[in-house]
Amino acid sequence: MRDLVKAHLDHRRIWQDFDYCYPVISRRSKGVSLGVNLNPDKVCNFDCVYCEVDRKTPAKRRDIDLDQMAREMDALLQLTQDGTLFRVSPFDSARPDQRRLNDIAFSGDGEPTTAREFPEAIARMAGLLEARGLRDVKLVLITDSSRLQAPEILLGLERMMAWNGEIWAKLDAGTEAHYKAVDRSAIPFQRILDNLLATSRRWPLTIQTLFLEWEGKGPSEAEVDAYAGRLRELQVQGGALKEIQLYTVARPTPEAAARPLKADLLEAAACRIRGSLPGVPLEVFHGPQDWPEVNAHEA
């Protein structure tokens, strides 16, 4: 919690008049992450209770212009490299160690893998990094894990993983009941698990897990144990886990009942998971100490 700076609390997917690309200071990236929004229409196949996207406000546009996307990203790469980005609020709050360019991340107002342009967008972003000699900058997919085995997505993933890529895959639950309550998707939970297994057999996965207080309750010990069991089963069946990122709500969402899980409860969950999965790195990211009683979207 002490590591939070102003820029960590402002992850709006907006930069000036851009339509697709935006910068954030990311705790999980430990530096600058340049986002690519492949879902400007705000359509998503999940309806997570903690999602920050305001779907009441009409979308600015619904199409994807890959040429414009590339121009926007190239401009952001320049602003980051020459330091101009850090003269603008809230990026001026970033400490020197947080100003390192870590990645281009596919994470927008919906699930990136639902966009048919996904494979070509990967190729365009890799080309920009190549042209600037930024071979150490990663390409990261932040995904709800629902379409990881679709043929066109596999094509994009192969391109991405050939360029220092990482897959950050969501798993918020150990049971179908918790999955339905928190992620609220029509996609069967088993499909998520099958996709995680098939993908982790090819490439090591970073598992992203958000535990929160929802309607006054956090996940039970039984739910946390079931979650750890799912990942342990994945390992037994030949899947590789790079790390687990365990976090909670950090910014206000449209759902007033979605609140950060208290630090001691998040640490207790982390302890149970570490006990079940020895050898798998797990990092915990706490929410802010002060949380508004009135939700920002309702104020």
Image: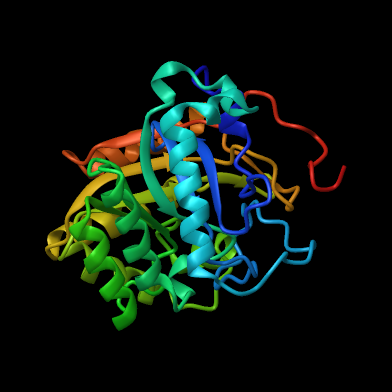
Q: Is residue 97 above or below residue 52?
A: above
Residue 16 rendering spot, x and y as whole percentages: 67, 45
The answer to whether residue 33 is left or right of residue 20 is left
Residue at 48% from the left image edge and 74% from the top image edge: 115
Residue at 43% from the left image edge and 63% from the top image edge: 175
Question: Could you say which is closer to the camera, residue 142 or residue 71?
Answer: 71
Q: Quadrant of the C terminus?
A: top right
Q: Is residue 219 above or below residue 260?
A: below
Q: Quadrant of residue 250?
A: top right
Q: Quadrant of residue 123?
A: bottom left
Q: Residue furthest right?
A: 299
Question: Could you say which is closer to the camera, residue 238 or residue 21?
Answer: 21
Does any portion of residue 101 appear in the rendered image?
A: yes
Residue at 45% from the left image edge and 39% from the top image edge: 78
Residue 44 rendering spot, x and y as whole percentages: 58, 70
Residue 195 rendering spot, x and y as whole percentages: 30, 72
Question: Could you say which is closer to the camera, residue 58 or residue 224?
Answer: 58
Residue 131 rendering spot, x and y as whole percentages: 29, 50
Does any portion of residue 170 appear in the rendered image?
A: no
The answer to whether residue 37 is left or right of residue 123 is right
Picture mark count: 0
Residue at 46% from the left image edge and 59% from the top image edge: 70
